[in-house]
Amino acid sequence: MATLQKIALIFTIIGALNWGLIGIFDFNLVEAIFGEMDVIERIIYTIVGICGAINIGIFFMDFVDHD
């Protein structure tokens, strides 16, 4: 599960950086990379959203190491 959360966190960070670019510079990195491909954009945004939902689990993790 830790690997899945790390991968999800990477996608979440990329999504957050993209939103930052949109907010500050009105520049959409996903659109710049993939062009006006609505289906691919929607898939990418859906993946980022799912990864964000997966990362909600971080709030409920026990951060104490049980070795």
Image (cartoon, rainbow, N blue to C red):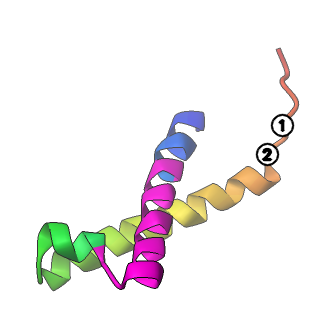
Looking at the image, residue 3 sits to the left or right of residue 37; the answer is right
Q: Horizontal and vertical percent for residue 54?
A: 58, 58
Vertical arrangement, residue 51 with respect to residue 19, above or below:
above
* Range shown magenta: 9-28
Q: Quadrant of the C terminus?
A: top right
Determine contact: label 2, label 1, CB under 8 Å.
Answer: yes
Q: Horizontal and vertical percent for residue 42?
A: 28, 79
Q: Horizontal and vertical percent for residue 31?
A: 21, 76
Is residue 64 a member of the stretch shown in magenta? no
| Mark 1 secondary-structure assignment | loop
Task: Look at label 2 and name its amino acid.
Answer: Met
Give the crowd class for mark 1: few <14, some 14-19, many >=20 residues within 10 Å: few
What number is the disc on residue 63?
A: 1
Q: In the image, what residue occupies the spot 50% across and 59% down? A: 12
Give the farthest residue toward the front: 25
Residue that badge 2 annotates: 61
Is residue 11 a member of the stretch shown in magenta? yes
Q: In the image, what residue occupies the spot 78% across and 56% down? A: 59
Tell which of 62 and 24 is nearer to you.
24
| Mark 2 secondary-structure assignment | loop
